[in-house]
Image: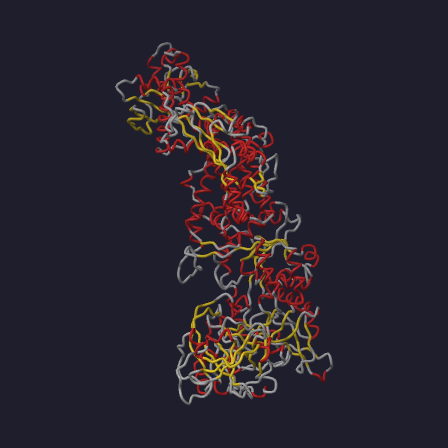
Amino acid sequence: MDDVSEGKDFSFPKQEEKILEWWTEVKAFETQLEKTKDLPEYIFYDGPPFATGLPHYGHILAGTIKDIVTRYQTMTGHHVTRRFGWDCHGLPVEHEIDVKLGIKTREDVIKMGIGNYNEECRSIVTRYVGEWEKVITRTGRWIDFKNDYKTMDLNFMESVWWVFSQLFKKNLVYRGFKVMPYSTGCKTPLSNFEANSNYKEVPDPEIMVTFPIVDDQEGAAFVAWTTTPWTLPSNLALCVNSNLVYVKVKSKSNGKIYVVAESRLSELPVEKAKKGTPNGAVDDKSKGKTKSSVVAYEVLDKFPGSSLVGKKYVPLFDYFKEFSDVAFRVVADDYVTSDSGTGIVHCAPAFGEDDYRVCLENQIINKGENLVMAVDDDGCFTERITDFIGRYVKEADKDIIQAVKEKGRLVKTGSFTHSYPFCWRSDTPLIYRAVPSWFVAVEKLKDQLLENNEKTKWVPAFVKEKRFHNWLENARDWAISRSRFWGTPLPIWISEDGVDIEVIGSVEELEKRSGVKVTDLHRHKIDHITIPSPRGEKFGVLHRVEDVFDCWFESGSMPYAYIHYPFENEEFFQKNFPGHFVAEGLDQTRGWFYTLMVLSTALFEKPAFRNLICNGLVLAEDGKKMSKRLKNYPSPMEVIDDYGADALRLYIINSPVVRAEPLRFKKDGVYGVVKDVFLPWYNAYRFLVQNAKRLEVEGLPPLVPHDPTTLLNSANVLDQWINSATQSLVHFVRQEMDAYRLYTVVPYLLKFIDNLTNIYVRFNRKRLKGRTGEEDCRIALSTLYHVLLTSCKAMAPFTPFFTEVLYRNLRKVSNGSEESIHYCSFPQVEGKGGSRIEQSVNRMMTIIDLARNIRERHNKPLKTPLREMIVVHPDAEFLNDIAGKLKEYVLEELNVKSVVPCNDPLLYASLRAEPDFSVLGKRLGKSMRVVAEAVKAMSQEEILAFEKSGEITIANHCLKLSDIKIVRGFKRPDGVTEDQMDASGDGDVLVILDLRPDDSLFEAGFAREVVNRIQKLRKKSALEPTDIVEVYFKSLDEDKSVTAQILKSQEAYIKEAIGSPLLDSSLTPEHAVMIAEETYHNISNCNFQITLSRPALAFNNKAILHLYSGNAKYANALKVYLLSRDHFNLKTEFLVGINKIKVDCIENQPAIDVVLGEHMFLTVGDYYSQTTTNNFS
């Protein structure tokens, strides 16, 4: 394996860019697809975005979810085709061209020519494709841009035609009128989904208008309330609620007589008496008080709303007088409520969904007949409305109110601020307007839709069960046509008399029926094509209707159209439908998810997909919508350039947004992922590589990792534990990914990496550094190697860059491995994860944390050794582990001399039970007080029995362990103070520390202080763990015997801790190269100096002199020569010569053999160790 840099020098973004270059160089994605081509298909549908804007966090989020799932499915044995798609038609494109060319009306398009207009649209569709590819690729997503699909391609459009023709054959298509949100800015109706996406708080007028009752003896008038005065010229009916009580009232001030709902009487204005004012008129805006309205009016009569049905009234305007026989009468419907207005609603069927329905049900208008429309496509009044012809409706409100006032029909006027929908593209206010449209009869499919929804799996499930289910429950027929230009044209040809309707399902059929060659299905290429009437020549020809498809119909047809089904890939489709997986945002429950479900149900009686992940909205840090204008969020590329794509991926996946909840995006959160996940992960990997390289530096054979199956039988308890934990990780990731719960994986990974670095690597440093023997070192390194390799494979779908970086180095010591981690199979669960050893180590860490807390409370740093720790726990097996195979780790980590297990919970603790009110409160209700008292009164024995059985019945309520909190209070031995002994508990474990000072522990404490200073000086000197240094100690005290005695008694501990002997400064040779030196004062009342130097050669002068028969000149020349040699090369030569080298290159000196360990030593430490053992002089 190659050397690696320190974490602080490792740039995650730059490494990712190198990986991207390498992926491109080796065609990694293409190679993966080729390697898996014969595996079972996993079908993923990618919802097409518009390419007229740049990708934002919402796209990156959905793209990351898709990439993780498809990478995982590839690694688990599937072939996953991933083709990017583009939504090319519709309003977003047309609106940009309208703005660019200054197009205001439909006529402007006709004048410039539909062909010119559509080609302008086509020219901008792929404007940002390059930018999209750059950003999406940089996020690590593997998807095919070269073989993408576009909704404007001929093949895609032809499949859309086929879909529509099938619906027509199934009698699921009809023509009618639909009152829809209508954009006068874009001159087109919008879907409800589009209309709901841009609400604003705006002021609007509100007025009350009188409608005198025909033949009423008292001259009474109905009073209706409206916030859309511009609809009054089109009034055809008034609507009441049959079940409400209505009153006829007379104003005490002016004698006017009104009919309103009794519950809304308070809304009538209070007026001062005026003479000569006709019934229904008011001169000024009313400022009447609500409470005094009832007093201001005399109630003449009360009656149910049903009694008003059929009564005629005097129209406000005479623009629709030809409807007098059927219109201008009262009808009833439950949509009229008692909480707003006057309880009487004015109905203009062309401008309200309920208005249209009610008028249709009461035969004021008839289905199928042309509805008289008083407002044109630009939102202006037609010539029928003679007084306001050509006026934009919203601008005409004031003049219409004035006209009503002049007619003496205005009761009250004012304004109010409310939330009103605006066009999401043109930012103009929407109106509701009846438009002729072609419909898919969705209501016929409702039961099948609900049934198919049950066959799908959604994450999170509540979106399917609540939001989407409710949407399907209330599904209305879907208006799929748009009176626009740039889109897939409806394949409907109609005769002039409307008798012949032909739906074309393919290009071939159109060519055959028309005799015209077809190469493009856009309007300007086919609008001129006619079809002969099936009734014969005398009936003329059929012309295509002008409408195009709602672009949601196109995206809903994607599962068929992107593979040109049924014209191609028929067998492939039949084998793999429904698709396995889709993922988009929460807003698509009423958009793409819905249209997919409707069309697949209509065509095949199946859902379009099997599994779905629905994500929430990514908001700015302040909780507001991300806004380019406000600049309230960092650009995605800025975040990636700073912290890397992997960090961004993990940040968004480990957030509420993957559970369909909003995420407040914080750049600091991405940095937190780098700090908490990637740096510890990298440092564990770096520690492995450095210690594997150390073997080579020390002249030992390179690391060849042991077979993982043999490592499962390692005798070391932490090897057993980390192997088990790794299997648990693999099992967990498989389990959660198979269930599409991506958001649970990252917290588990965080805990795993924390355990790997802070338990396995930290507690095993001696083994990994070779201080427990070479073979034990190789077992530990091999275990760490396989843990890192396996965890990298398990996390490759989530962090494709970082795992690739690690894998490319790790594979260098593994024969026959795949070139890229993304060609590897996902790890199988081998052995049994989640075993008892995992539980024991987790409990051990709890004990360590509790003991640390006690030390902190009493200001006892870990460097201070303590005499004893008592662990109280009811599980005898766990206590055996703590007192047995885990004991050495506990003792070393906590710096205590002994661990005493105790399984008698009452020896050091008193128990008391507390009810968990947050859990039990709602469940028990009034019984809570009785149960709480009984729980608090539980005896010690009852508590222990409850813990053992796991449940207890109190007042006929069965309580579980999660319902009752068991509190352990420390029972301190008699005569012992808190400063002398203290405890800390968590659940069923209690840790007790003996804090009393012990002189016998002083030496061990001082030794730890010295080791601590040496380690800090190494770090300060920027030394790598593999850098070999010699450490010299110099006492600065007057009485040097104290430290000398301590260091002698602690010699073995210090040598093991720092990896070499601690040398007295008097042993420092003149030729030693110093690296660092620092002086320390008042450390355990001692003063001393620590010096670090490069390894220095040490000579046995007597033995060298003997080589040359006592010739001192020759002996000195040999030492000069050896000191001039490179230390590493000299060490290598001794290794090759089996601790012996021949020196025959010194001029005028005889050749001699120098033996390592006899004539010289590679370090002063080696010389010191041997001389103290062998008494060399």
Q: How many marks?
A: 0
Q: Residue at x 54, y 82 (%)?
A: 235
103 vs 34, left or right, is: left
Of residues 148 and 1010, the one nearer the viewer is 1010
Quadrant of the image containing the C terminus = top left
Of residues 967 and 862, the one nearer the viewer is 967
Q: Position of residue 934 (x, y in %)?
A: 52, 40
Residue 683 can be seen in this image = yes
Q: Quadrant of residue 584?
A: bottom right
Q: Residue at x 52, y 36 (%)?
A: 938
Which residue appears farthest toward the top when viewing the image?
A: 1109
555 vs 1133, left or right, is: right
Name the image colouring: secondary structure
Residue 799 can be seen in this image = no
Q: Position of residue 762 (x, y in %)?
A: 46, 32
Which residue appears farthest toward the bottom when viewing the image?
A: 276
Q: Residue at x 39, y 14 (%)?
A: 1172
Which residue appears farthest toward the right when viewing the image?
A: 535
Q: Position of residue 894 (x, y in %)?
A: 43, 28
Q: Position of residue 283 (x, y in %)?
A: 40, 84
As displayed, is residue 127 above or below residue 295? above
Of residues 1107 and 449, the one nearer the viewer is 449
Of residues 142 and 263, the one nearer the viewer is 263
891 vs 721, left or right, is: left
Which residue appears farthest toward the left when viewing the image?
A: 1038
Q: Quadrant of residue 85?
A: bottom right
